[in-house]
Image (cartoon, coloured by chain):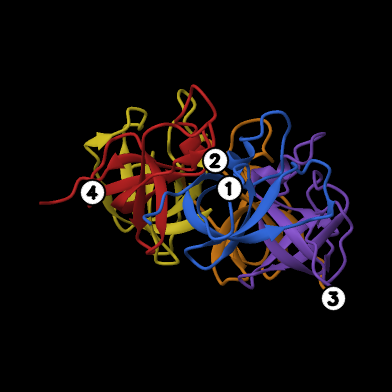
Chain colours: A yellow, B red, C orange, D blue, E purple
Amino acid sequence: MIRGRVKGQIWSSKHVDKLPKGGYLEVEVESGENIIAYDPLGCAVGEAVLLTQGSVAAGYFTEFKAPIDSLIIGSIDEKE
Amino acid sequence: MIRGRVKGQIWSSKHVDKLPKGGYLEVEVESGENIIAYDPLGCAVGEAVLLTQGSVAAGYFTEFKAPIDSLIIGSIDEKE
Amino acid sequence: MIRGRVKGQIWSSKHVDKLPKGGYLEVEVESGENIIAYDPLGCAVGEAVLLTQGSVAAGYFTEFKAPIDSLIIGSIDEKE
Amino acid sequence: MIRGRVKGQIWSSKHVDKLPKGGYLEVEVESGENIIAYDPLGCAVGEAVLLTQGSVAAGYFTEFKAPIDSLIIGSIDEKE
Amino acid sequence: MIRGRVKGQIWSSKHVDKLPKGGYLEVEVESGENIIAYDPLGCAVGEAVLLTQGSVAAGYFTEFKAPIDSLIIGSIDEKE
């Protein structure tokens, strides 16, 4: 997995039918690259998150075959 | 997923039999790299799109095993 | 596989239900990038480890479909 | 998919049994990196080609499980 | 696939149970990165090899699910 920080949400009015409903967050990873990940946890902007990628991300959806290759699987605990 | 912007279409007269019919768009992603993605949505040049990659992209095709590793799954809403 | 060196552990109090229990280690790989990998071996900070990635990592979990795309599969023997 | 240009052919006298017979072409992609891809189309040196990668490439082989992670799926039409 | 050159062997005394027995070679690829690959062919240091990666590499092992994401599938013939 890789760590990233939530930058914001994106919306897509025009999309394929199989796209799961829910939040799609733009996440900046350590390399500076931005990943758009499905968020099943309701993460906030600025939150540090753990991302899983590839077919492993799609495997999270068990009722149908979702075209999702990036998934937030957790929020990383940070020292306050 | 990653975001990209449609640059144009490509054509391939000589191809493997299993290639799905439809549009193949050249999409520039944030790193500056170009990805050729299958487009089930009819996107236009200049449109911001959401790309899924790997076996997840191929999983979109359910009637046969398509050799497609990049798929446009949505158009990203942009402020006007 | 790629080699890496364990930098520390991360914790995630808020996570998806399917996350396997156990240690999640931050591992620095040769490119300087950090990977968060599931550790079934109990590796220590500073240890040189062998990482496998992608759906192969998830395949390690046979009882349920784990959203894990990075797995430590061994500790690399180093000359002392 | 990514686009590339054929640089030449490679040969491997010593190989695993499961390697499909046919042409293995060295293809330079836009990043400057070279990929060795299986070529079911008989492409020539200098030809612009479309490459698919990962398990999607292996899925092209239906009679046996081929250890192929890069496949030429088409020749890209170029203006003359 | 990508080409690489064998640099040496690595050993792992402490490893997961499912690790296949055999040689694990450190291979330098064209980008300068090092990959640790399973070697079913008995390649020597300095030999030019062809690497396959991802779940395709794991698919080589048919008797059990091996956590192997990099596999040497051939030795590349070089002019002498």
Q: Are marks 4 and 2 on the same chain?
A: no
Give the image quarter of residue C8.
bottom right
The residues tagged by marks 4 and 1 sit, at their Cα atoms, a distance apart of 31 Å
- The residue beneath circle 3 is C79
The residue drawn where x is 63% and y is 71% is C30
The residues tagged by marks 4 and 2 sit, at their Cα atoms, a distance apart of 29 Å
Mark 4 element type: loop
The residue drawn where x is 80% and y is 70% is E79
Give the image quarter of residue D6.
bottom right
Q: Are marks 3 and 1 on the same chain?
A: yes
Amino acid, disc 2: Val
Q: Which mark is residue E57?
A: none
Amino acid, disc 4: Glu
Foreground label between 3 and 1 = 1
Label 1: chain letter? C
Q: Which mark is residue A56?
A: 2
